[in-house]
Structure formats: structure tokens, C-alpha cells
Image (cartoon, rainbow, N blue to C red):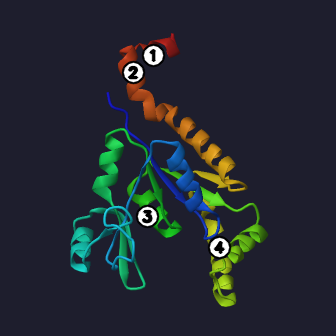
Amino acid sequence: MNKKGLLIVISGPSGTGKGTVCKKLLQRNDFWISVSATTRAPRKGEVDGENYYFISKEEFIKRIDNEDFLEHAEVYGNYYGTPKSKVLEQIDNGKDVILEIDIQGALKVKENYHDGVFIFILPPSMEELKKRIINRGTETEESLMTRFKSAYKEINFVSKYNYAVVNDTVEEAVRKIECILIAEKCRVDRIKSTIFDSREGLIHEQFYD
């Protein structure tokens, strides 16, 4: 029997390094990363099907009506969404899927796919988070304060997730996530059909003799 893969949803406030963590996870593991669909125009160097699936607004709305997305949102006049069929196809084929997504999207995915593993990336401290955002060198004073205030609010959503991982260092954060995934694959409710199939139901007698 083919074991289903895991849907691994990773999110957290801006500046926590979740993108870097996901990149390292993909380097070290045979995961499949979900590619979002969007109605915005491709930017220079972006490749359709690799960075995003670039589709028209009409097509996107049609797919919403057909319930083709695990989640979707409108941001600054453009639509973004996670294609459901491609993700479920990979999971059904036994492939673990990483979905790096914002908190709003993650909570929508949780509503539609209860069996996912939801991991929240935290900074070592709010002071360290502020340093990381400043060190990017891309923020004005005003946008820096906006991002920092948003981070304070977003951290309150950590209780909606299954796990929280503090990103002290990328290597350590990745190691913790890998340990979480090993534990998830050993959960009885995920593997009970395999256990019963392999022992022809005799496991029940062992437990209760």
C-alpha cells in the first residue's frame, strides 16, 4: 500500500527566515514544494510553473468557483492561490509537500486540509527580529515599523499551529523540523492501516489479550 505524503505548512512573521529554512529543507530532503498560481504579470527572470503559475483573472475566478484552490487571497489587486489538485496528487503519490505561505493562507489551508503539519517559525527574540529586518537594507523607517507591528500581531497566531520552531540558526531550525516530521510519520493514526494490513488485524489481539 502506498503511504500518503505529508502536507507541511510553514509560516511566520516577516524576518523570521522561513524562506531560508524552507530552502535548506529542500536541499536536504526529497520534498516537493508547492507553486502558487497568480494573476499578476511575471517579473523579469520568473518562469511559469517554477516561480508561479501565471494565469488570467478570469481563469483564476473560474478556478475559485470550481473550488480548485486549497486557499486563495487578493493582494493589491492581484489574486494568489495554492492549486489543490497538484498538491493532493503529490501527497497521494507518497511525496511530502512543503507549502511556505503567509499566516492568513495557512489558516485557510487548515480549514480545508485538517491532516497537514502546521509549523510556525519564531525569531529568537523580537529584538533579533528587528535586527534581521533592518539588516535587509530594503526598508524605510516607516515600513520597518509597519512590519515590526505586524510581526507582533502575527505571533499571536502561533497557538493555531501544531508546532513552533525558534530559528536561532538555520541548521538547528531545519533539524528540529526534520525531527517533527519523523515523529509525525510515526503517529498511529497515520499508519494504523499499514499496521493492521501487515499483521492482518492480529495487533488488536496483542493489545487486549
Res 196 label: 2
How far apart are the two marked residues, 4 and 1, measured between alpha carbons?
48 Å
Q: Is residue 119 visible?
A: no
Question: Which mark is first along the chain, 1 or 3?
Answer: 3
Check disc 3 and report the residue beneath it. 108
Query: What amino acid type is highlighted by mark number 4?
Result: Ala
Q: Secondary structure at mark 3?
A: helix
Q: Is residue 74 left or right of residue 209?
A: left
Marks 1 & 2, CB-CB < 8 Å contact: yes
Check disc 4 and report the residue beneath it. 151
Query: What amino acid type is highlighted by mark number 2?
Result: Phe
Q: Secondary structure at mark 2?
A: helix
The x and y percentages for residue 84 are 31, 57
Tell me the mark number nearer the camera, choosing from 4 and 1.
4
Residue 71 in which image quadrant: bottom left
Relative depth, front residue between 142 and 42: 42
